[in-house]
Amino acid sequence: MAVFQHILWGYGLSYPDHWAHRTLGALEGFAETAEAFDPDYSGPHSGQILVRGEWNCLRQPIEPIWNRHIGMLAGWVGAKKLGSAPWRMGGAVGLEAEIVLPQKDNRRLWTGILEHEFTVLHFVVLHIREERAEFEPQATQIISSLRFLPNVSGVLVTDEGLPLPPGYIPANPQDIVDSITNPDQWLAYDGQSSAGALQAFYWREAPHYGWQITEYVPFPSPAELGFARFSMAKGNRTLTLGIMPYQDQDTKETLARLVFKMG
């Protein structure tokens, strides 16, 4: 079995060696063949498992999250009948449902969400009816392998001992926060991850690398701060981390940069 770990969201899944994995924007996809990720593919083994993370920073009850998820999904596929049942997996709790598609649709659709602390994982499993006997046992095995990790492997660490998300590179702090007057006390990094995923990463990984979180203001929050803020301490050192949202001009996605004020 191959092992997948999401460095930002902190979950792991095992999947058969002959299956393919792809990152599709905010989604992680798993399928028997890589061709299945092509929207125009209609051949055999087109079934997919899709997983998306969400940061539930305000600990909102799971029912409203489920209602939004199921409503959007039903509108997307034109579902006629919806229902739900309690679901537990990997130490998380949530809801699941098999969505009845229009009779002319040859696909089967199952979906579920799971909440673990601040993290909510959205699952969608889609396959054609004729491949149910082959596909569903493998999909069930993959989802049943779900585990939430206390820390993940492969995390880079800066010279200052700060864990760094994948793909983040040094940037000019004054390009991100224009009010900085003492740039020598600041570090900044630019990358392509969402504010929610970055909050999940630092909430989990900062303590693993010896940083005590002394204050956390999430984004979004009733405080209307406009960004997420972590105050952290390690020995006699202190710092403030700002996770600064911005909109990508090409994809229109809301991503975030990192700024650290040292001392």
Image: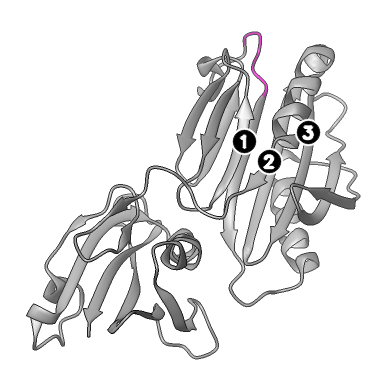
Alpha carbon distance from label 1 to label 2: 5 Å
Q: CA distance from mark 2 to mark 3?
A: 20 Å
CB atoms of marks 2 and 3 within 8 Å: no
Which residue ends up furthest to the top in the rendered image?
44
Label 1's element? strand
Amino acid type shown at disc 1: Leu
Q: Amino acid at mark 2?
A: Leu
Compared to residue 51, the image places residue 176 above or below, namely: below
Q: Is 180 within the magenta?
A: no
Contact between marks 1 and 2 (CB within 8 A): the answer is yes
Label 2 or label 3, whichever comes before in sequence order: 3
Residue at position x 75%, y 36% in the image: 144
**Mark 3 lies on residue:** 109
- Can you tell which quarter of the image residue 240 is in? bottom left
Disc 2 is placed on an element classified as: loop
**Residue toward you, 16 or 100:** 16
The magenta segment is 43-47
Above or below residue 97? Residue 40 is above
Q: Which mark is residue 13?
A: 1
Q: Is residue 106 visible?
A: no
Q: In the rendered structure, which amino acid carries the disc numbered 3?
A: Leu
In the visual, does 167 lie left or right of 8?
A: left
Query: Considering only order in the chain, which callout, 2 or 1, is on the residue closer to the N terminus?
Result: 1
